Image (tube, coloured by chain):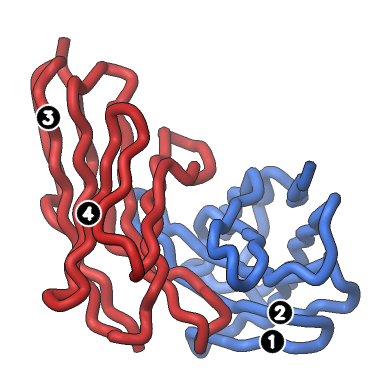
Chain colours: A blue, B red
Amino acid sequence: SQTIHQWPATLVQPVGSPLSLECTVEGTSNPNLYWYRQAAGRGLQLLFYSVGIGQISSEVPQNLSASRPQDRQFILSSKKLLLSDSGFYLCAWNHAELGEQYFGPGTRLTVT
Amino acid sequence: GENVEQHPSTLSVQEGDSAVIKCTYSDSASNYFPWYKQELGKRPQLIIDIRSNVGEKKDQRIAVTLNKTAKHFSLHITETQPEDSAVYFCAASAPNSGYALNFGKGTSLLVTP
């Protein structure tokens, strides 16, 4: 069966510091991968999606970037965090045509 | 891009009553419509979904209906139980955007005993 991992689970970072969040999927190949962010008490905002290695589509212009160095690995990065980057970061995967999208356990980021 | 509207934002029902949450979407290319349940502090869990070639789908106490012409879809929960209390999100996705999900803003459902 497929499993999706995210780490770290929680993170507290000062404003201006860099960020790297990692997501990996096991038990499948060539998945579509997604990063979403959920601000406290709010809905889910799509940040990036990838349909293959090295292919990244950005939905919201901001100080975040994403990379997909391997088929089942998706990384979210920032060079300098802002207070507004605080939130719950969720990675998700699916297979095109099948539709069903499943979320990882998430990383709760607090920027201080 | 796709815009998904969800109503109501909060819903309170008594145990055993039915709950209905409604969503509309704007992009006619959207063809997949999932619903997620999110409990406090946890990841969203897929509870039911519907594709554009189907008008209704049911899974035990949960059902979803889709009206493609009007571009709206709804979640129906019957015989609600306290454990149904959570935030529910609707979403829409299209093949031309990698099936990325565009979410509604969520409905906080409270089921009181």
Q: Chain of mark 4?
A: B
Q: Secondary structure at mark 4?
A: strand
Circle 4 or circle 3, nearest the eye: 4
N-terminal of the two: label 4 or label 3?
3
Circle 3 or circle 1, nearest the eye: 3
Q: CA distance from mark 2 to mark 1?
A: 7 Å
Q: CA distance from mark 4 to mark 2?
A: 35 Å
Circle 4 or circle 1, nearest the eye: 4
Tell me whether the residue at label 2 lies in contact with that at label 1, contact meaning CB atoms closer than 8 angstroms: yes
Q: CA distance from mark 4 to mark 3?
A: 15 Å
Circles 2 and 1 on the same subunit = yes
Q: CA distance from mark 4 to mark 1?
A: 33 Å
User: Which disc number belongs to residue A56?
Assistant: 1
For label 3, the residue is B18
Residue A79 visible in this rendered orientation of the protein: no
For label 4, the residue is B65
Q: CA distance from mark 2 to mark 3?
A: 42 Å
Q: Is residue A39 left or right of residue B15?
A: right
Circles 2 and 3 on the same subunit = no
**Residue at the spot 51% in from the left edge and 63% down from the top edge:** A37
- The amino acid marked with disc number 2 is Ala
- The amino acid marked with disc number 3 is Ser
The residue carrying pointer 1 sits among few (fewer than 14), some (14 to 19) or many (20 or more) residues within 10 Å by Cα, namely: some
- The amino acid marked with disc number 4 is Thr
Q: Chain of mark 3?
A: B
Q: Secondary structure at mark 1?
A: strand
- The amino acid marked with disc number 1 is Ile
Circle 2 or circle 1, nearest the eye: 1
